[in-house]
Amino acid sequence: MVTIEFERFGELKIDGRIYYSDMMVWWDGEREFVEKGHLIDMKLFTRLIRKKPEMVVIGGGQQGRVKIPDDVRSLAGSSKIKLFWEPSDKAVDIFNAMARTGKKVAALVHTTC
C-alpha cells in the first residue's frame, strides 16, 4: 500500500521519497509528476481517472487555491467517482485513510499555495 507521508510547502513525501512537484498518486503506488497549476482542467482530470478509481482526492494547496471547474465535477458525477477537495494536508489524510481500506483511490496533490 502506498502512503503519502507528508505535504508541506513545495514538498511531498511518498513512501520515503521526497518530490518537489505536484503529484498524482494511485492506490497501487503508481505516481506521476504534474506541472504546477491552480486549475484541474478536463485534460488533467482524465489523466487522473484513467485507472478508473472509485474516488479522487484533490489537494488544493495549503491555502486552497486550486480550482475544479463544473465540467470536471460533472464528469466525476456521471462516472460515479466520489470527488473530494480539501487543502493538501487534509487531502493527504483522506487519501491515506481510503488507501488503507483497500479503496481504489487516486489523488492529485498541489504542494504550494
Image (cartoon, helix red, strand yellow):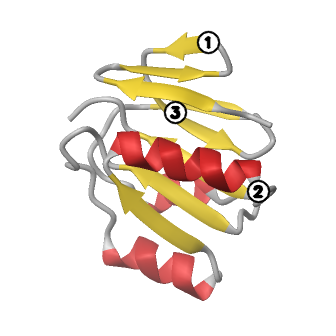
Q: Is residue 53 found left or right of 64 in the rendered image? A: right
> What residue is rendered at 41% in x and 31% in y?
35
Q: Does the CB distance between marks 3 and 1 fall below 8 Å?
A: no
Q: Earlier in the sequence, mark 2 or mark 3?
A: 3
Q: Residues within 10 Å of mark 3 (few under 14, many from 20)?
A: many
Q: Which residue is mark 1?
A: 17
Identity of the amino acid at label 2?
A: Thr
Q: Is residue 99 found left or right of 57 in the rendered image? A: right
Q: How many marks?
A: 3
Q: Is residue 96 found left or right of 37 in the rendered image? A: right
Q: Which residue is mark 3?
A: 23
Q: Which residue is mark 2?
A: 101
> What residue is rendered at 46% in x and 83% in y?
74
1 shown above or below 50: above
29 shown above or below 18: below
Give the distance between the C-alpha atoms of the residues marked 2 and 3, in whole angstroms: 22 Å
Q: Locate the C terminus by quadrant.
A: top left
